[in-house]
Image (cartoon, rainbow, N blue to C red):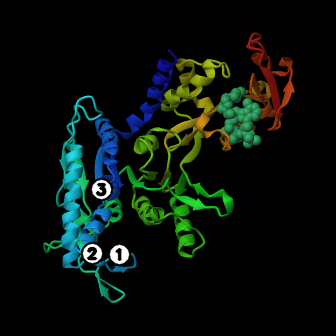
Amino acid sequence: MRLNTDFVAWFRSVAPYINAFRSKVFVVAFGGEVVADGKFVELVHDLNLLASLGVRLVLVHGARPQIEARLKESQLQTTYVRGMRVTDAATLQCVKESIGRVRVEIEALLSMGLPNSPMANAAIRVASGNFVTARPVGVIEGIDLMHTGEVRKVDTAAVRFRLEQGEVALLSPLGYSPTGEIFNLTLENVAAEAAIALKAEKLIFLMDTDGIEEECGGSSGALLLRELTVAEGKVLLTKLANKAARLSDDAQLYLPFAVKACEGGVSRVHLINRHANGAVLQELFTHSGIGTMISEGPLQNLRDARIEDVGAILQLIEPLEIDGTLVRRNRELLEMEINRFVVVEHDGMIIGCAALYPFPHDKAGELACLTVHSDYRGTGCGDTLLKNVEAKARSQGSKKLFVLTTRTAHWFVERGFLQADVEELPKAKQGLYNYRRRSKVFVKKI
Ligand SMILES: CC(C)(COP(=O)(O)OP(=O)(O)OC[C@H]1O[C@@H](n2cnc3c(N)ncnc32)[C@H](O)[C@@H]1OP(=O)(O)O)[C@@H](O)C(=O)NCCC(=O)NCCS
């Protein structure tokens, strides 16, 4: 029974994400390591799930380990200039062979449809082709990088057409020039440019570490930065350039492209650990995610509630109504009183709310329904809501704010509320006081 209740609650909790993600373009980028170490099957199951929920998927793969192995086999030495491989004709041959092999393996795994597996009835159609036009990087520090290139253009019309047909687009780190040449590209360059050109909702980099982890020094280890704005990302990159910060190798590799993609209009870039079970699902379908999310501006904002927030508010307060912390409110009442509510939105999801009921005759206001989602408690969200309600009450001419609570007395006391008698409530409220519930009354002068 408990299992059923949890399952139903969980399924309902992911509904907002499913609605928000349908028909959106997600670019998922992963290195050749994912294919090399056999982890791609698990990833394919999760990608299949996303595709079946209506997400338009563009996959960008790399092939670094495979290229390295092939070069070693051919006993070819590689020269690097500013971290970029010089691709001469012999190296390009290895690059083409390695990327071709990885692409075929990916296509094969995406074609799986075994019964009794998450891929049953999946029938993913993969589209790959000459979607990326490239140009040569040219001469750097006096060295010609030859067939090493960078993205010049992504054929968005062709990719979009394929996505609209329900296909998954697969991009390789190769590009072609109008003169018919082939260029060796990096997966991060292809992924960021494709995401920008396609105006993707999300760009997801799968990496070997948990996300952007800033080393704190001493014994405290590294701190995972769960959210980062573009401005914060740029500060970190400057610190990195000045050797004032240290990041993992792949964080150093992906962060500049993540920042670039956000600046180019991609709503969110996620950097997540590919080794975590269901990494993509955990990142996308849970409030807190598992990696680092980068966005242009701050993700959290406080605003007046709107009628379309009613469902989300009901979902937020439901567990607290069940355990008796809050008084039950039905949908009709909430719809009628929605203009009394303020909400805190985090990345498009409602994670906190509070209501103010004015009693103008008594120059008083009631704070009610103060709730913060359990994943976001202890981060000052409750305080922000309280301050907003206080300011609102003050602007309406109230001199005091009162609250009725059964379990949160200390939280209010620590914020300047004093316990009071029921008789101190406005007369209209006294008439409604539920003596069975025996809530405590707290009042704050504002
Ligand atoms: C009360 C509530 C809104 C606070 O939200 P929040 O965003 O966690 O608040 P803040 O981050 O501003 O404050 C967190 C602090 O409050 C403390 N706190 C949380 N709930 C508390 C409670 N019931 N009693 C006393 N202190 C409490 C936390 O321990 C934390 O203190 P710390 O930083 O010293 O550890 C949130 O805990 C909640 O939604 N609770 C359930 C609903 C509820 O009780 N609402 C009030 C109904 S009248």
Q: Secondary structure at mark 3?
A: strand
Circle nearer the N terminus (2, 3): 3
Report if residue 368 is visible in the image: no
Q: Type of residue at label 1? A: Met
Distance Cα–Cα, label 2 vs label 1:
8 Å
Q: Residue furthest bottom?
A: 142
Circle nearer the N terminus (2, 1): 1
Q: Nearer the viewer, residue 360 or 372?
A: 372
Position in image of residue 166 (x %, y %): 22, 41
Label 1 sits on residue = 84
Marker disc for residue 148: 2
Q: Are marks 2 and 3 in contact (CB under 8 Å)?
A: no
Q: Type of residue at label 2? A: Thr
Marker disc for residue 60: 3
Q: Quadrant of residue 50?
A: top left
Position in image of residue 226 (x %, y %): 55, 51
